[in-house]
Amino acid sequence: MSGTALYDAIGPRGHRRILLGSVLGGLLIAAIVAVVLLRLANNGQLEAERWEVLTNEAVQRRLFVDGLVATLKAAGVAILLSLVVGALLAIGRISRYAWFRGLVAAWVEFFRGLPLLLMIFFLFLGGPQLGVDIPVFWALVLGLTLYNSAVIAEIFRAGILSLPKGQTEAAYAVGLRRVQTLRIVLLPQAIRLMLPALVSQVVTLLKDTALGFVIGYPELLRTGREVIEFVGGPYSLPIYVEMAVIYIVVNATLSWFARWLDRRTARRYGKTVEMSVADEAA
Amino acid sequence: MGLVFDNFDRYIEGFLNTLSLTLISAVLAIAIGTVLAGFRVSPVPVLRATGTFYVETLRNTPLTLVFFFAVFVLPQVDVRLSFFAFAVVALTVYHAAFFCEAVRSGINAVGVGQAEAARSIGLGFGQTLRIVVLPQAFRTVVPPLINVFIALTKNSSIAAAFAVTELTKIGLDLANTTGEPIPVLLGVAAFYLIITIPAGQLAGVVERRVAFAR
């Protein structure tokens, strides 16, 4: 339902009301912003000298060349691994052996039901107990992979199941085997339908790399904290704000791309795999 | 397993803290999220823009960074709270954006005819939304709301890094003192699954019920 069905074409009185609403709403929001700015100013947070730290070349190099690159590296490796593992899990989920389907389903449910941070700690702390030292980078990447491969497996499965049954039947009728059917007929069509949901999952994964902060992997957030410790607490607000802007610009671009892809795919090829709000939150 | 039973009271303490952290944040976030969803479908451009700006900002920011803003930046605007309350603020602010999107998709799922019928018998925008659209939207929206609640439960573990003694923090402390992280953290995992798996089942049941009612 488009928003317009909730209210009629707006007449003169409606326009006056909307104007009133806009002015009141605008004033309320302006008041909130003003209180925040005033208090920040009272605490000396808005002095130009503090924000000039952002013009410091060494600070920017740390944030972009060290922090952002490390974030993208962890995210990139984790995405590749998650796609491979997720595809394998999805194939397991539609296997013809019921016990194997059940096993894979339990695996997926288990890892989707646990906090990602717990998995990262499990690898990071549990590894040494078994005599394997897992570096922070791999604890983060493998943790991300365990969680995201489970989510991606569900996206793959939804993509394959959303295709009409006739596709599989026709493939069998011309004599293709199960694996051939999947590879030649189903996957090429399913990938188109699930691509928007996959891109949207990339945004979630990218956000989750910030958990590397907790175990000490020097990604963007950790690097930002180190910069703050170096330049001093008074400069923390400008650097936090800049980090937020970096994350938002990168992720909003990706989200926008996912939605554009979704609209385009839906127009050309029909219903795409749904982008789950809950998966985005986790 | 012995380790888990020896420290059962600590696990229960962490479990209850996680539960209250999650429930308080969920109630607040659902309230704010519903208001934001109202903003996003309203005829007033300023409110629409505010809702969109809020959602787009928060859904693209890592929750850990939101925690940093709560713990280090709120004191700069003279808001000083306990670590638990800071965690509630961070979790609420972040998840309100996702509850908003869940509710909005629910509003969009209610048939156009419903809103048109409400308009044609003379209800205003607020009445249409409150009396006709939202009650129906809430029904379809319950499964996604539960799913966001599950995400919130899992995400509450990040509070462990900000001095809140919830499940994950208890697990880390026990792992430290006993030197056996594997059984200790498996115990923690079991407690999370006590919340997330039944909630997931519930979402499935409600989804099938609603599907039948249509």
Image (tube, coloured by chain):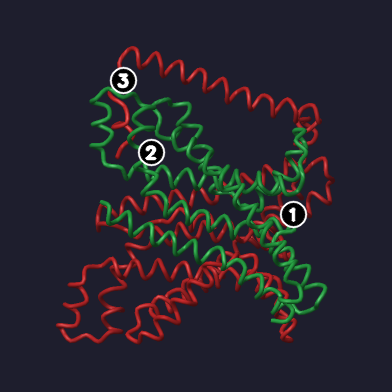
Specify the quadrant that holds the C terminus of chain A: bottom right
Q: Is residue B118 above or below residue A62?
A: above
Q: Position of residue B112 (x, y in %)?
A: 26, 38
Residue drawn at x 41%, y 85% is: A100
Q: Is residue A160 left or right of residue B58?
A: left
Q: Chain of mark 3?
A: A
Q: Secondary structure under badge 3?
A: loop
Residue drawn at x 77%, y 33% is: B78
Q: What is the crowding at mark 2: few (fewer than 14 residues within 10 Å), some, or many (at least 20)?
A: many
Residue drawn at x 78%, y 51% is: A227
Tell me how far mark 2 sits from mark 3, CA to CA. Answer: 22 Å
Q: Position of residue A272 (x, y in %)?
A: 32, 58
Nearer-N-terminus badge (1/2): 2
Q: Chain of mark 2?
A: B
Q: Quadrant of residue B178?
A: bottom right
Frontmost residue, A228 versus B133: B133
Q: Quadrant of residue B177?
A: bottom right
Tell me how far mark 1 sits from mark 2, CA to CA. Answer: 37 Å
Using the rendered image, report if marks 2 and 3 lie on a common chain: no
Q: What is the crowding at mark 3: few (fewer than 14 residues within 10 Å), some, or many (at least 20)?
A: few
Q: Colour of chain B?
A: green
Residue assigned mark 2: B134
Q: Chain of mark 1?
A: B
Residue assigned mark 3: A10
Residue B162 has which mark? 1
Chain represented in red:
A
Specify the quadrant that holds the N terminus of chain A: top left
Frontmost residue, A200 versus B193: B193
Residue drawn at x 45%, y 79% is: A104
Amino acid under disc 3: Ile
Amino acid under disc 2: Leu
